[in-house]
Image: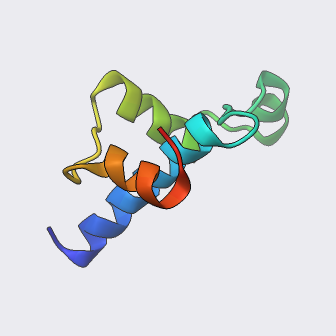
Amino acid sequence: MTREDADVEVDKMTVVMHEKCMPGSVHDFTPEFKTMWHVDEAEPSFALLQGIQTGENPIRIDGWEALLAKYFGCE
């Protein structure tokens, strides 16, 4: 895994940490926002989380769940 690949995987872990362990949730842009700003795609963090949750874009760091638990108390 290259450094760039590792950075992408850490970004994925960060999104999951925010979704599971922080107050609130990772949300898509509202329809009103998308219309006002002519946005056709999902909010990047939301799209990333969707890919992780569906298995389309899994986290490729072995034991990532244990790392989140160890360093952030997140399970």
**Horizontal relation, residue 10 to residue 6: left or right:** right
Regarding residue 43, the answer to whether it shows in the image is no
The percent position of residue 20, horizontal first and vertical second, equals 57, 35
**Horizontal relation, residue 69 to residue 28: left or right:** left
**Horizontal relation, residue 48 to residue 8: left or right:** right
Depth check: 18 or 70 in front? 70
Residue at the (50%, 54%) spot, across then down: 14
Depth check: 62 or 11 in front? 62
> Which residue is farthest left?
1
The percent position of residue 38, horizontal first and vertical second, equals 73, 38
Q: Which color mode does the image show?
A: rainbow
The part of the image, by quadrant, that contains residue 52 is top left
Regarding residue 52, the answer to whether it shows in the image is yes
| Residue 30, above or below 44 | above
Residue at the (36%, 68%) spot, across then down: 7
| Residue 27, above or below 63 | above
Image mark count: 0
Residue at the (24%, 49%) spot, across then down: 63
